[in-house]
Image: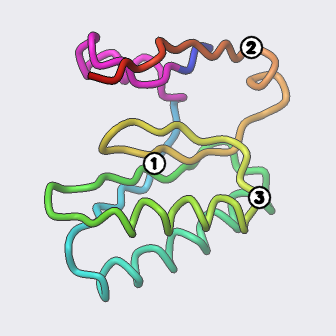
């Protein structure tokens, strides 16, 4: 399995082949902080449940719409850290969170192209 980190020179469609196959719950975050808090609380519970049950069938897909705030990204990262989530893939407007089996972990190859500053 190959997991790719965002490279702006490649089209977004490449991400489809990099995301492990799972039954993902989709959560879209927007500018409404109260609504986002409810969604993130729910996502935290799902992450905890997936980790406890070693659930390699389900996952969580976060999408940041054009109105979402940076704080939502920071909060997801805080949740990942606090819940000790080890497997996730970040892309500019997406985050996929999943549990992985030991055999999947052995087959991972991470590749990326360093981003250049203009």
| Among the two numbered marks 1 and 3 on one chain, the one whose residue lies closer to the N terminus | 1
Label 1–label 2 contact, CB within 8 A = no
Question: For the residues marked 1 and 3, what is the alpha-carbon distance in whole angstroms?
Answer: 19 Å
The crowding category of the residue bearing disc 3, from other C-alpha atoms within 10 Å (few below 14, some 14 to 19, many at least 20), is: few
Q: Quadrant of residue 81?
A: bottom right
Residue placed furthest toward the front: 118
Label 1–label 3 contact, CB within 8 A = no
State the residue position of label 1.
24
Mark 1 vs mark 3: in front:
3
Q: Is residue 12 left or right of residue 36?
A: left
> Percent from the top left, x then y, of residue 93?
30, 44
Mark 3 vs mark 2: in front:
3
Label 3–label 2 contact, CB within 8 A = no
> Percent from the top left, x then y, of residue 95?
44, 46
Write the start and end of the magenta stretch as one range. Answer: 4-20
State the residue position of label 3.
84
Q: Secondary structure at mark 3?
A: loop
Q: Secondary structure at mark 1?
A: strand
Residue located at (26% from left, 19% from top)? 13
Q: Secondary structure at mark 2?
A: loop
Residue located at (33% from left, 15% from top)? 14
State the residue position of label 2.
107
Q: Is residue 99 left or right of residue 88?
A: right
Indicate whether residue 17 is drawn in magenta.
yes
Q: Is residue 117 left or right of residue 86?
A: left
Question: For the residues marked 3 and 2, what is the alpha-carbon distance in whole angstroms?
Answer: 21 Å
| Among the two numbered marks 3 and 2 on one chain, the one whose residue lies closer to the N terminus | 3
């Amino acid at each position: 399995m190959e997991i790719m980190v965002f490279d702006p020179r490649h089209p977004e469609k490449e991400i489809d082949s990099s995301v492990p196959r799972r039954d993902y719950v989709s959560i879209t975050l927007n500018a409404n902080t109260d609504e986002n808090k409810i969604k993130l609380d729910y996502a935290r519970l799902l992450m905890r449940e997936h980790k406890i049950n070693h659930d390699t069938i389900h996952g969580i897909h976060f999408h940041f719409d054009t109105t979402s705030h940076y704080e939502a990204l920071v909060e997801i990262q805080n949740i990942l850290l606090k819940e000790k989530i080890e497997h996730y893939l970040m892309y500019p407007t997406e985050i996929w969170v999943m549990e992985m089996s030991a055999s999947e972990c052995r087959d991972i190859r991470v590749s990326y192209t360093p981003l250049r500053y203009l």
